[in-house]
Image (spheres, helix red, strand yellow):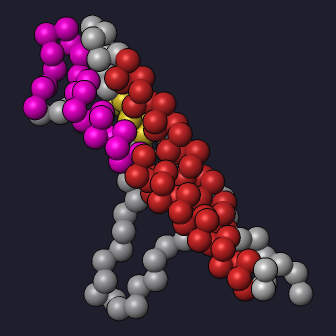
Amino acid sequence: MTMQPIQLFELASRQAEWLSVRQQVTTTNIANANTPKYVSKDLTPFDAELKSASGLGSMEMARTNAAHMTADIAGNGRVELKDSKLNQEIGVQESGNTVSLASEMSKMGEIKRQFELNTLLVQNINRMMLTALGK
């Protein structure tokens, strides 16, 4: 009997990489908050990475009832850097800059929480596997 790879670890690794890139994009936005004509950037959602991942591309939630809705993944299975949605609070500043520091700081908090959740899930999966092996 051969061991099958544990895709949860691969998935957690991909999410950690995506979060790292998103954090870098967000810090670049913050650094350019006063740069004239700078347009705020963000990544497509991680759901797009799930859809495009080799070996993970077929991961979809099971529909147990025909009345259940299907989920359309934003980005058509690709993760890419794109212009952020325009923040209606600040709009486009006179300099042409679209960075909202409040939105970017909110994203940083979201990224931190997702990193912590990812780490906690990996730790718990590892602990469960060790318990199952009797170690």
**Residue 43: x percent and y percent?**
42, 39
118 left or right of 8 in image: left
Residue in the picture at 38% in, 18% down: 31
Seen as rendered, the residue at the extreme front is: 135
Looking at the rendering, the stretch of residues picked out in magenta corresponds to 89-111
Question: Which quadrant is home to the C terminus?
Answer: bottom right
**Residue 100: x percent and y percent?**
22, 27
Seen as rendered, the residue at the extreme bottom is: 65
Residue 48 in sight in this render? no
Seen as rendered, the residue at the extreme left is: 89
Residue 103 in sight in this render? yes
Q: Nearer the viewer, residue 111 or 84?
A: 111
**Residue 119 falls in image quadrant:** bottom right
Q: Nearer the viewer, residue 135 or 19?
A: 135
107 left or right of 100 in image: right
**Residue 41: x percent and y percent?**
36, 29
82 left or right of 133 in image: left
Residue in the picture at 89% in, 87% down: 1
Whether 62 is drawn above or below 33: the answer is below
Whether 14 is drawn above or below 91: the answer is below
**Residue 65 falls in image quadrant:** bottom left
Whether 45 is drawn above or below 108: the answer is below
- Residue 108 lies within the magenta run: yes
**Residue 85: x percent and y percent?**
25, 36
